[in-house]
Image: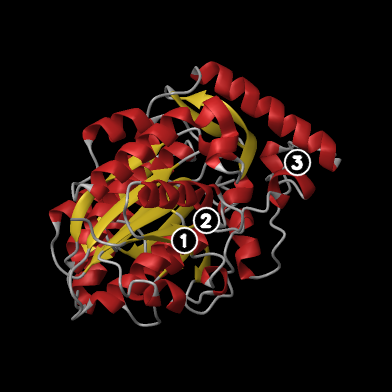
């Protein structure tokens, strides 16, 4: 029998890909017959350093899933602060099940390995049972949209989340099939880089960027 | 930068949780040793500085390229890092990574990262804004020996250095070090690796 699941999306900004992934997972869990609640930590106070809603949301949920973006090779600062708030709250509390999803704009799994390991270590430190995690790359394509609206670019991630939800409904940890599916590339890397650079330059034109290569802090030996 | 006419410049980003804790003492000691060795040292202390969260607003990519839109102490982090020969980041080790406040400060280095992408060491990365790469020194502290946390922290700092395409050194200090013991550790670090 499955525990009620709290899906906590923790990002440094609003309308995040973490929230989009979290909403999809929460819906998949409900479809699979699991009681699930989605919490957007940034929207609920995380951006103002208020993590009380994130702590209060733990109540009634025996299984917690953190969804966080990679930022400078680890989970972002809001997600880190969320874990710290949960760690403080976990003292003397009943142990919970814990899983994590770490996603990145980079396609290669090597970028997110340490971040997921940090989440696993958090579980160990606070006495929560680690129920596995997923990493997913090339998630910039989500653009904060509903995962279903992203189309083929998010097909592997949607499939992985479906597998994850089905496993949780059976009371099982994240299955290996979900882990493998989530890291499958939706397009070749060279194409992803080319499209990414094209989109960045397009955005620069749209915003009227004068000098994308500006170096305001260049030292004297870098100039000229 | 860093020749006979111009002293070498260090930026010590003190990611301690509170004044007087071990990372704070490590940062202070490191800064002192660097000064004694003739370095010019800039230091920012996370517990007392105003460092807001990076909101990933992309102003530093498109609106004011290379410069953060937030006007707080964190606004200076990219400049201090870009203009240093040594960037030292000191913090406790939490869950094998950086504590949240320290992580928040480190994330403010984003303006030094260019929005366009490249392949570096066989991986996709952002380009960097500056040709100059400060040497990155990571000093992590944990209250007792913990091999797994040490391994995770070391791997994290290695990834950070790869992203900044910088040479680096990672040091993990453990335990409540008495002043003399801390002095010895820092003296060895500065003389052996930084000079």
Query: What is the CA distance from the residue labelled 3 to the residue labelled 1?
Result: 27 Å
Location of the N terminus of chain A by quadrant is bottom left
Q: Please report, as a chain letter, where disc 3 is located.
A: A
Q: Position of residue A217 (x, y in %)?
A: 69, 49
Closest to the observer, B142 or A170: A170
Q: Are circles 3 and 1 on residues that touch, CB within 8 Å? A: no
Mark 3 Cα-neighbour bin, 10 Å: few <14, some 14–19, many ≥20: some
Q: Nearer the viewer, mark 3 or mark 2?
A: 2
Q: Please report, as a chain letter, where disc 2 is located.
A: B
Q: Position of residue A179 (x, y in %)?
A: 29, 34
Q: Please report, as a chain letter, where disc 1 is located.
A: A
- Do pointers 3 and 2 mark residues of a single chain? no
Q: Is residue B193 visible?
A: no
Location of the C terminus of chain A by quadrant is top right
Q: Write the residue at 33% across / 46% down.
A: A32
Residue at numbered disc 2: B107
Query: What is the CA distance from the residue labelled 1 to the residue labelled 2?
Result: 8 Å
Q: Is residue A205 visible?
A: yes
Q: Write the residue at 28% across / 53% down.
A: A99
């Amino acid at each position: 029998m499955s525990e009620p699941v709290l899906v906590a999306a923790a990002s440094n900004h609003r309308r995040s890909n973490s929230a989009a992934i979290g909403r999809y997972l929460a819906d998949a869990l409900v479809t699979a017959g699991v009681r699930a609640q989605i919490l957007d930590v940034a929207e609920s106070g995380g951006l103002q350093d208020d993590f009380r809603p994130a702590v209060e949301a733990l109540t009634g949920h025996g299984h917690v899933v953190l969804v966080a973006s990679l930022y400078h090779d680890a989970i972002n600062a809001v997600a880190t602060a969320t874990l710290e708030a949960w760690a403080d709250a976990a003292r003397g509390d009943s142990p919970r099940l814990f899983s994590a999803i770490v996603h990145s704009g980079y396609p290669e799994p090597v970028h997110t390995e340490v971040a997921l390991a940090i989440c696993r270590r958090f579980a160990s430190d606070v006495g929560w049972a680690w129920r596995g995690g997923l990493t997913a790359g090339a998630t910039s394509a989500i653009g904060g949209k509903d995962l279903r609206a992203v189309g083929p670019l998010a097909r592997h991630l949607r499939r992985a989340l479906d597998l994850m939800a089905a496993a949780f409904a059976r009371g099982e940890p994240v299955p290996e099939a979900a882990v493998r599916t989530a890291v499958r590339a939706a397009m070749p890397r060279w194409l992803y880089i080319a499209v990414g650079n094209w989109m960045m330059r397009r955005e620069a034109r749209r915003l009227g960027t004068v000098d994308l290569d500006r170096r305001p802090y260049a030292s004297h030996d870098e100039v000229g | 930068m860093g020749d006979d006419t111009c002293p070498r410049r260090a930026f010590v980003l003190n990611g301690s949780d509170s004044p007087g804790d071990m990372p704070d003492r490590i940062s202070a000691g490191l800064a002192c040793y660097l000064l004694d060795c003739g370095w010019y040292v800039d230091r920012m202390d996370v517990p007392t500085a105003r460092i807001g969260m990076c909101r990933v607003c992309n102003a530093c990519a498109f609106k004011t390229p290379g410069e953060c839109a937030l006007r707080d102490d964190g606004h200076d982090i990219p400049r201090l890092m870009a203009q240093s020969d040594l960037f030292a980041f000191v913090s406790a080790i939490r869950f094998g990574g950086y504590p949240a406040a320290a992580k928040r400060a480190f994330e403010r280095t984003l303006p030094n990262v260019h929005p366009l992408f490249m392949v570096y060491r066989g991986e996709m990365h952002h380009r960097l804004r500056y040709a100059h790469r400060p040497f990155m020194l990571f000093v992590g502290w944990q209250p007792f020996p913990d091999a797994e946390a040490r391994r995770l922290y070391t791997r994290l700092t290695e990834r950070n250095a790869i992203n900044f395409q910088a040479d680096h050194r990672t040091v993990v200090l453990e335990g409540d070090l008495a002043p003399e013991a801390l002095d010895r550790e820092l003296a060895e670090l500065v003389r052996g690796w930084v000079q």
